[in-house]
Amino acid sequence: MSAELFLKACFNQPTEYTPVWFMRQAGRYLPEYRAIRSKLSLLEICRRPEVACEVTLQPVERLGVDAAILFADILLPFEPMGLGLSFRRGEGPVIERPIRKAEDVRRLRDLDPKSDLGYVMETIRLVRHRLGERTPLIGFAGAPFTLASYAVEGGSTRSFVQTKTLMYSDPETWHALMDKLAVAVGRYLACQIEAGAQALQLFDSWAGALSPDDYRRYALPYTAKALALARKANRNAPIIHFGTGTSSLLELMAEAGGEVIGIDWRIPLDQARSRLPGKAIQGNLDPCALLGSVEELESQVLAVLRRAGGQPGHIFNLGHGVLPQTDPDRLRRVVDLVHERSAARV
Amino acid sequence: MSAELFLKACFNQPTEYTPVWFMRQAGRYLPEYRAIRSKLSLLEICRRPEVACEVTLQPVERLGVDAAILFADILLPFEPMGLGLSFRRGEGPVIERPIRKAEDVRRLRDLDPKSDLGYVMETIRLVRHRLGERTPLIGFAGAPFTLASYAVEGGSTRSFVQTKTLMYSDPETWHALMDKLAVAVGRYLACQIEAGAQALQLFDSWAGALSPDDYRRYALPYTAKALALARKANRNAPIIHFGTGTSSLLELMAEAGGEVIGIDWRIPLDQARSRLPGKAIQGNLDPCALLGSVEELESQVLAVLRRAGGQPGHIFNLGHGVLPQTDPDRLRRVVDLVHERSAARV
């Protein structure tokens, strides 16, 4: 196994077998992660490069995945930008000073990722040193819209009421916020490439809350700006552009950028692919399939491979992050199954 | 204004103007509703036909909508079926005895809507008496999948982890549960028609959590069964089949049944329509658009009408329920704007 296989698939080139990794593959479902987490908070792990490196590597050997993903959180830039960030047990992120008006946006500090998030860059360097050319390392950031939703709501949301209220009532402030986030995200991604990340994933996890018209007006230009800034830093690192519930947004997401479009289980992989000529596709097993019977799991994995049709440019993944209840052995089984079946095809 | 206009639109026939009503048009955003709610719980209102009738009628005059919708809750059948139902302030529904295994399904009582939910039928009779033939009354029920998700999770969910775990690990129990729910929902809807409801809406609000393959296997047959049972009771009452996040499911939902397919803002109305030949379409303004500026609201209302293209068979609605923060005057403005602009077109 070498880094090349994954990168080739990202660029839509044929590979010996289908590469596979899992969003949130470093996380709570792993006993060795929970052992560390029982002593350190999420932010403490992120801020200690040796520990973050360890956690990043935990799933790589155990699962046999074809890529590592940096252990970090999409909200890390919020602390140096002055928004205030903490995590309450079971409640997710809490943004201490949420954005509600023009003054709140003006107050935001510009992100200087090299110094502000130096610990992330150090983690990347450590991981690269440990992995060498065996397994590629994916860096990542949240997309401007998804970040803005946390910044405006002050935490997680189901309804996006505050976010859209700002968008629809004070578009000037919205656009100013999104522009600041686009620059921060673009610089942060570029910096991760410089530190050694070989691919990037942009998480626009909540873009699916928007209508296509709103996505085009209120989100797309800033995702495009962030990705263009990241692109300038390096022409060789592929970008995976991911969202959930994006069945109506795929073409617009592709227009915003990325070599690979990441989808969830809500759209059949072959349908997504036929709408995205030239793009590679990442996905799209429902993470809940790992909680059912082995037969159901295998049948769903094979259904994804069938829809991928043995064409180049498929990266097997879940449609969203690994759930904490997941048995690591089930994930290992998925990796092996994907490798075996896709290799047999060639 | 007469009941006929709305019913014609449901059957894809030309009307003088586009009819409009709002999901959750009777609810917390109305001061006159809050006045009643300050004295009675949600379940108490539902169980007192005179009060439920009053609440059903509150928005009809005030907003000038073209249909009334029964004031009730999709979970009312849970109490007589033995699941146990209560509402905790700010937390939504709590199901006391959730479904997790075969035994839980066997224990479920069959619903006898006429006696078990006689208070709903009485509300329908009272509302019909008050409205006469001026404004039609829409009855409703939750679809089997959406009901099952509450029954299995024990309340609201974002991830549907318990629901899908049951589905994927014990399909026999899942299918037994869904079959019981399909019969209950079908009978309940039929009974509402007999009591006087002139149209029905089936809320499969959370169907969008499923992949198309899963929807076809685990949900569609039961929605079809429920709608066939409702249909037997009366051939003249149109059925609106509604879900959110259903961009990938539209054809399958149409296959399951309904004269009208209800969509949210995530898919452009013209795209949905072109995929649903012969069906009328209901939707699809983002409820958050009512919280922004008047200019933005009007522009979004006109965009929906533009996408409807002046064709018969459009019922204007939101993509989901009215939010509690909504100003009633804004909804009135939407009704007037839809009426004016669509009438001008003819």
Image (cartoon, coloured by chain):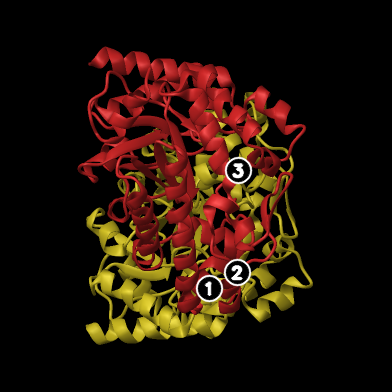
Chain colours: A red, B yellow
Foreground label between 2 and 3: 3
In this picture, residue B325 sits left or right of residue B20 = right
Mark 2 neighbour density, 10 Å: few (under 14) some (14–19) many (20 or more): many
Q: Residue at x 59, y 53 (%)?
A: A116
Residue nearest the observer in this picture, A50 or B314? A50
Q: Using the image, tell me which numbered label, if any, was put on residue A166.
A: 1
Between the residue at mark 1 and the residue at mark 2, the CA separation in whole angstroms equals: 9 Å
Residue nearest the observer in this picture, B45 or A245? A245
- Determine whether label 1 and label 2 are within 8 Å by CB: yes
**Any part of residue B322 in sight:** yes
Q: Residue at x 75, y 60 (%)?
A: B89
Between the residue at mark 2 and the residue at mark 3, the CA separation in whole angstroms equals: 26 Å
Decide which of tag 1 and tag 2 comes sooner along the chain.
2
- Give the quarter of the figure containing the C terminus of chain A: top left
Chain assignment, label 3: A
Chain assignment, label 1: A
Mark 1 neighbour density, 10 Å: few (under 14) some (14–19) many (20 or more): many
Chain assignment, label 2: A
Q: Using the image, tell me which numbered label, if any, was put on residue B156.
A: none
What amino acid type should be assigned to the residue bearing mark 3? Tyr
Residue A39 % position (x, y): 77, 33
> What residue is disc 2 on?
A99
**Any part of residue B68 in sight:** no
> What residue is disc 3 on?
A119
Q: Is residue A286 above or below residue B65?
A: above
Instruction: Give the structural element (helix, strand or loop) at label 3.
Output: helix
Residue A229 % position (x, y): 37, 56
